[in-house]
Amino acid sequence: EDIEPDVQHLKQEAASMMRKIELLEASKRKLLGEGLGSCSIEELQRIEQQLERSLSNIRARKIQVFKEQIEQLKEKEKGLLDENARLAEKHGICLQPARNDQNENQPQYYVESSPSSDVETELFIGLPDTRTRRISHQIWYKFWY
């Protein structure tokens, strides 16, 4: 017998929650631009102001995230520059400051070329055998002419 009032209370609470859900869904549809035909000018202005506030909050958050990402990338760049300098020193490579038009705060470096580098700068197209013959032909040609 004491259960009956509790059941009634739960039914009322469930009905109240259903109404709240319906109102929230209707509000959501209006914010999405659906079902605006029955809205008054005042209601449309209220929705517009709410959307403008939301958009302002979204843009502020986006700017904050971009700033955080920029700071993380600057830290990563600093770490990579430090590591690059450490590796260059370890391998005896001379790093010279390079001209930096984009950001005066951050130094950029280039490797000073050494005369003893074993880098081939010519482009050869074809099989390796053809390339070898071409090189020996060039040497032979320079020798005789």
Image (tube, grey):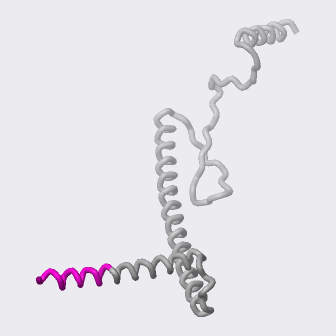
- Based on the picture, tell me whether residue 7 belongs to the magenta stretch: yes
Q: Residue furthest front?
A: 1
Q: Position of residue 24 (x, y in %)?
A: 45, 79
**Viewer-proximal residue among 46 and 105:** 46
**Viewer-proximal residue among 125 and 143:** 125
Q: Residue furthest left?
A: 1
- Based on the picture, tell me whether residue 43 belongs to the magenta stretch: no
Eyeballing the image, is 105 above or below 79? below
Q: Position of residue 130 (x, y in %)?
A: 75, 10
Residue at x 12% of width, y 83% of height? 2
**Viewer-proximal residue among 30 and 105:** 30
- Predominant SS of the magenta segment: helix
**Viewer-proximal residue among 114 and 20:** 20
Eyeballing the image, is 107 above or below 3? above
Q: Position of residue 109 (x, y in %)?
A: 60, 46
Q: Which image quadrant for residue 101?
A: bottom right
Residue at x 73% of width, y 10% of height? 132
Quadrant holding the N terminus: bottom left
Q: Which image quadrant for residue 139?
A: top right
Residue at x 40% of width, y 82% of height? 19
Number of marks present in the image shown: 0
Image check: 35 left or right of 133? left
Q: Position of residue 144 (x, y in %)?
A: 85, 6
Eyeballing the image, is 66 above or below 45? above
Which region of the structure is painted magenta?
Answer: 1-14
Residue at x 28% of width, y 81% of height? 11
Quadrant holding the C terminus: top right
